[in-house]
Amino acid sequence: MSRAALLVLADGRFPAGGHAHSGGAEEAVKAGRITGAGDLEDFCRGRLHTAGLVAASLSAAAALGVPPTDLDAAADARTASPALRAAARRLGRQLTRAARAVWPSDELDALAREFPKGAHQPVVLGLTARAAGLGPADAAHCAAYESVSGPATATVRLLGLDPFDATRVLARLAPELDRVADAAVEAAARVRHDGCGALPAAGAPLLEIGGEVHAAWAVRLFAS
């Protein structure tokens, strides 16, 4: 198992398209729910324990070898917003393309054939982790980190926030991120016996509503 592979996968410069998405931060900034570092930390904490937990669990389960078709259906069921489902599939398609180029894999090839328009990004992330020789804990940590690093980076651009302040937010959340990743791995391990119903379904209604609002804007900086 290569820890260096995890660094490559989690690097924000990995060409998987995440830089074009704000994770709901753009809509939250416009609505006045994020005005500075304190609000950003609250937003990221809420996202980590809801959407982040769900994504980390799906990724861990995929890394364990749970069938991606089952996990993709579970991801659909846990994403109420059509706009966010579409965004997750666009990100999944881009990640599939990048992952197949970097870590060629029969499983990734099969996924691309099964989901030509893209599977949900966390599912693809878990299979990418498998292809890179990583385990479910690595996949869970990567998904959980992405759930907060995207909004933090986007807020630097949206508000002109000091990058030091945004990075401090991520550092302060690190212990919680570890706990979320651990919980995700535990949930994923139960899927083989209890089915995908064992995966968390932590909802964030304001994120879902915000996703629909954001998708209706004529002009926006980020895709979601």
Image: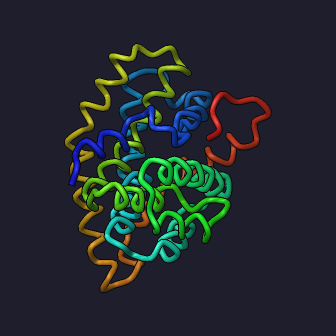
Q: Horizontal and vertical percent for residue 218? A: 79, 33
Q: Horizontal and vertical percent for residue 29? A: 56, 28
Q: Is residue 1 left or right of residue 127?
A: left
Q: Is residue 27 left or right of residue 177?
A: right
* Quadrant where the N terminus is found in the figure: bottom left
Q: Dividing the picture into quarters, in which one does residue 198 lie? A: bottom left
Q: Is residue 189 left or right of residue 52?
A: left
Number of callouts: 0
Q: Dividing the picture into quarters, in which one does residue 171 lie? A: top left
* Residue shown at the point (39%, 67%) measured from the top left: 62
Q: Horizontal and vertical percent for residue 12? A: 42, 34
* Quadrant where the C terminus is found in the figure: top right
- Extreme residue toward the right, this view: 218
* Residue shown at the point (62%, 28%) measured from the top left: 30
* Residue shown at the point (60%, 31%) measured from the top left: 31
Q: Is residue 173 above or below residue 113?
A: above
Report the coloring of the rendering. rainbow
Q: Is residue 41 above or below residue 10?
A: above
Query: 100 or 203: which is nearer to us?
Result: 100
Query: 109 or 206: which is nearer to us?
Result: 109
Query: 3 or 46: which is nearer to us?
Result: 3
Q: Is residue 147 above or below residue 129?
A: above
Q: Horizontal and vertical percent for residue 204? A: 49, 53
* Residue shown at the point (52%, 43%) measured from the top left: 16
